[in-house]
Image (tube, rainbow, N blue to C red):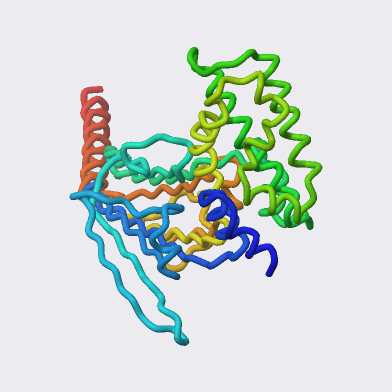
């Protein structure tokens, strides 16, 4: 296709995002959580698909001494299918990616609590995928993901406009690199119109060149000499953020949870035996957070027996007191 031949000439990072979004190679990731009676839990990630997608950074598996990892490869109709498994034993809360709270990465977190009561123990599972805020940043692209837009390329100019504007906004926070605020706004308005009015074929041709310098052309004599290069550097995190979001468009995620005792509340899509099941993908956290919740209770027979015996003893004592009072009368 002509669109792919043009994409090969685009800047590498944005090209990767376009390629991953338009080719849509499916990856299946299964997250399994098993709560144990003592409050610990096992957490397992399994991703299966093409090696390019399984080992990319859209949905990276955690690394570290607390995790055990294995990789398998098998043939399926002449194609190599890779399976990556990662698991560990934990308690409390974990946020992914560990050690980072950047909005660029896919942020998800788990929290497991165990609360001991008089006659029962309560367990609670919460798993959250942070929303990617795509409708705020690039609504046309978000509509394309949701399938409510038939234009397959209009979102490209919108994404580029957001990335460039976000990079410029970051530079405005730097005393050394900030430019006149009115000039910055004029440039951003110009860039928005610049990308919108370029036709599809011309847009891909433009992306194959130094499109940013061309887009800034009318203002170059009003800008510091290295300003365009500074904007390129400031754009990089937002390019990466969009590339990860677009790469998640073809990921199917399943979460299976096993809780001790009797399930008291949940928002699962289905229950099979003692397994709670959720099935979702980027669409569920495309803009807002996607929250998974479940709770269970385990009653203690010994504690219940102790309570019954205690109540029985109090009742018998009450009867004895009444009996003694009547005899005295």
Q: Is residue 161 left or right of residue 70?
A: right
Residue drawn at point x = 41 percent, y = 47 percent: 295
Front in this rendered view, residue 34 or 96: 96
Q: From what the image shows, is residue 218 above or below residue 23? A: above
Q: Is residue 95 left or right of residue 173?
A: left
Residue drawn at point x = 56 percent, y = 61 percent: 250
Q: From what the image shows, is residue 324 above or below residue 112? A: above
Give percent across and percent down for residue 193.
Answer: 78, 35
Q: From what the image shows, is residue 241 above or below residue 51? A: above
Classify residue 289 by image quadrant: top right
Front in this rendered view, residue 212 or 309: 212
Classify residue 219 by image quadrant: top right
Front in this rendered view, residue 4 or 89: 4
Position of the C terminus by quadrant: top left
Residue drawn at point x = 65 percent, y = 25 percent: 220
Position of the N terminus by quadrant: bottom right
Outermost residue, bottom direction? 77
Give percent across and percent down for residue 82.
Answer: 37, 72
Outermost residue, left direction? 65
Q: Is residue 263 left or right of residue 139?
A: left
Residue drawn at point x = 32 percent, y = 59 percent: 44
Classify residue 196 by image quadrant: top right
User: How many numbered circles are shown?
Assistant: 0
Give percent across and percent down for residue 15.
Answer: 56, 54
Q: From what the image shows, is residue 234 above or below residue 90? A: above
Give percent across and percent down for residue 119.
Answer: 28, 43
């Amino acid at each position: 296709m002509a669109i792919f031949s043009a994409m090969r000439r685009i800047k590498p990072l944005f090209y990767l995002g376009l390629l991953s979004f338009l080719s849509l190679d499916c990856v299946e990731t299964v997250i399994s959580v098993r709560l144990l009676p003592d409050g610990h839990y096992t957490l397992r990630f399994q991703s299966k698909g093409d090696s390019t997608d399984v080992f990319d950074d859209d949905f990276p598996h955690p690394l570290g001494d607390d995790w055990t990892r294995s990789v398998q490869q098998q043939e399926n109709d002449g194609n190599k299918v890779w399976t990556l498994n990662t698991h560990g034993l934990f308690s409390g809360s974990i946020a992914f990616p560990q050690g980072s709270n950047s909005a660029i990465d896919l942020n998800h977190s788990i929290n497991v609590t165990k609360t001991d009561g008089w006659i029962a123990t309560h367990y609670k599972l919460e798993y959250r995928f942070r929303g990617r805020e795509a409708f705020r940043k690039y609504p046309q692209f978000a509509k394309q993901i949701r399938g409510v837009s038939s234009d397959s390329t209009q979102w490209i100019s919108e994404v580029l406009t957001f990335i460039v504007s976000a990079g410029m906004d970051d530079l405005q926070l730097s005393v050394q690199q900030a430019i006149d605020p009115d000039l910055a706004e004029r440039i951003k308005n110009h860039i928005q119109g610049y990308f919108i009015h370029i036709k599809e074929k011309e847009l891909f041709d433009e992306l194959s060149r130094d499109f940013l310098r061309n887009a800034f052309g009318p203002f170059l004599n009003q800008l510091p000499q290295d300003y365009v290069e500074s904007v390129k550097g400031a754009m990089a995190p937002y390019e990466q953020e969009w590339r990860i979001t677009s790469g998640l468009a073809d990921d199917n995620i399943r979460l299976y949870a096993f809780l001790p005792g009797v399930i008291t509340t949940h928002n699962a899509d289905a229950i099979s035996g003692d397994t709670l099941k959720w099935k979702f993908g980027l669409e569920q956290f495309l803009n807002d957070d996607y929250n998974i919740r479940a709770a269970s209770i385990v009653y203690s027979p010994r504690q219940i027996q102790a309570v019954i015996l205690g109540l029985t003893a109090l009742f018998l004592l009450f009867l004895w007191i009444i009996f003694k009072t009547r005899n005295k009368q």
